[in-house]
């Protein structure tokens, strides 16, 4: 029986879905809804956020969330293309997974620049 790399992509898909479903709602609340409601006054100022994201552990966590969300989205797009009748799965897989890899590299560059 031939070995397949599908397990790696399924792992990234499952981990990305889990992290995205638990972390993104909290991020939306903390950075969007709570400040609009008057909570966390001054916490989203440039100086505070710059100091917060400057920590290496925070950068690692933010990268992990972005990385896993991108790979989750890539696999979802691959399945969506198949559902819409695009049957060239190999080409679709290359496009979406290369896109996720480029997005991951862009996240690394952006986070290292902070």
Image (cartoon, rainbow, N blue to C red):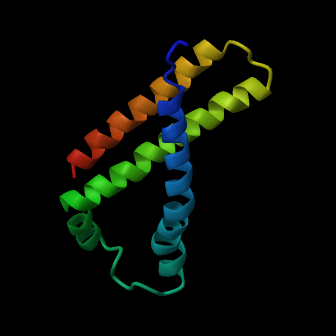
Question: What residue is rendered at 55% in x and 66% in y?
Answer: 25
Toward which corner of the image does residue 6 lie, by quadrant? top right
Left or right? Give the position of 14 relative to 76: left
Residue 46, position as x, y percentages in the image? 28, 68
Toward which corner of the image does residue 101 lie, by quadrant? top left
**Figure check: 110 above or below 10:** below
Towards the viewer: 108 or 87: 87
Question: What residue is rendered at 54% in x and 55% in y?
Answer: 18
Left or right? Give the position of 56 relative to 82: left
Toward which corner of the image does residue 91 lie, by quadrant? top right
Count of numbered marks: 0
Residue 9, position as x, y percentages in the image? 51, 32
Left or right? Give the position of 108 relative to 96: left
> For the view shown, which residue lies furthest in the front direction?
1
Towards the viewer: 66 or 42: 66
Question: What residue is rendered at 33% in x and 79% in y?
Answer: 43
**Figure check: 59 above or below 38:** above
**Figure check: 107 above or below 19:** above
Question: What residue is rendered at 78% in x and 28% in y?
Answer: 83
Left or right? Give the position of 88 relative to 21: right
Residue 110, position as x, y percentages in the image? 29, 44
Towards the viewer: 17 or 41: 17
Q: Quarter of the image containing the N terminus?
A: top right
């Amino acid at each position: 029986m031939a070995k397949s790399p599908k397990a790696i992509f399924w792992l990234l898909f499952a981990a990305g879905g889990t992290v995205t479903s638990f972390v993104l709602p909290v991020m939306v609340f903390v950075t969007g809804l709570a400040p609009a409601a008057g909570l966390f006054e001054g916490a989203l100022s440039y100086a505070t956020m710059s100091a917060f994201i400057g920590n290496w552990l925070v950068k690692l966590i933010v990268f992990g969330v972005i990385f896993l969300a991108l790979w989750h989205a890539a696999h979802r797009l691959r399945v969506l293309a198949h559902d819409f009748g695009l049957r060239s799965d190999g080409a679709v897989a290359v496009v979406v997974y290369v896109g996720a890899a480029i997005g991951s590299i862009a996240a690394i560059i952006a986070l290292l620049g902070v």
